[in-house]
Image (spheres, helix red, strand yellow):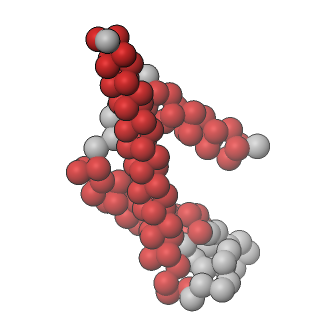
Amino acid sequence: IQTFLYHGCLFTYCVLTLAYNEEKLDIRRIYVDFFFIIGIILWASLGNALYTNENSHYDWFFITGSTFPFVPTKLMPLVVLGCVFGMCLIIYGIYYGIRRILVGVQEKKDVKSYE
């Protein structure tokens, strides 16, 4: 339940900040997202190393390869980086697509108001 609540609140906060123009996505600054994901992977690696012992195994951020056995263990951090960064690119695409549609609708309204 904790992870559903956490991720649900995180998702809702992000959507609302975009919807109310408190934050704007800028594709020219996507490198910040890339470095942030690298930081999360490094933090997860540290946590996995510190907490894993003979009695328990941790796989924070799914980077050890135990969750997806079809991916080679050494490649798993790169696969996670690619997947999460790919999702960032998809979010940027959706954002700019919706903005383009809304701008087009507004321009049509403006043209009709002048006629």
Would residue 46 be seen by someone viewing this image from the given angle?
Answer: no
Q: Residue furthest right?
A: 1
Question: Residue at position x 46%, y 46% from top?
Answer: 94
Between 70 and 104, the one lying in front of the other is 104
> Residue 32: percent from the left, percent from the top?
29, 53
Question: Residue at position x 58%, y 64% from top?
Answer: 60
Q: Is residue 102 rendered to the left or right of residue 74?
A: left
> Residue 109: percent from the left, percent from the top?
39, 18
> Residue 71: percent from the left, percent from the top?
60, 84
Between 17 and 100, the one lying in front of the other is 100
Residue 14 vertical placement versus 32 (above, below): above
Question: Residue at position x 31%, y 59% from top?
Answer: 35
Between 13 and 87, the one lying in front of the other is 87
User: Which of the 4 image quadrants contains residue 57?
Assistant: bottom right
Q: How many marks?
A: 0
User: Which of the 4 image quadrants contains residue 105?
Assistant: top left
User: Which of the 4 image quadrants contains residue 21?
Assistant: top left
Would residue 10 be seen by someone viewing this image from the given angle?
Answer: yes
Quarter of the rendering occupied by the C terminus = top left
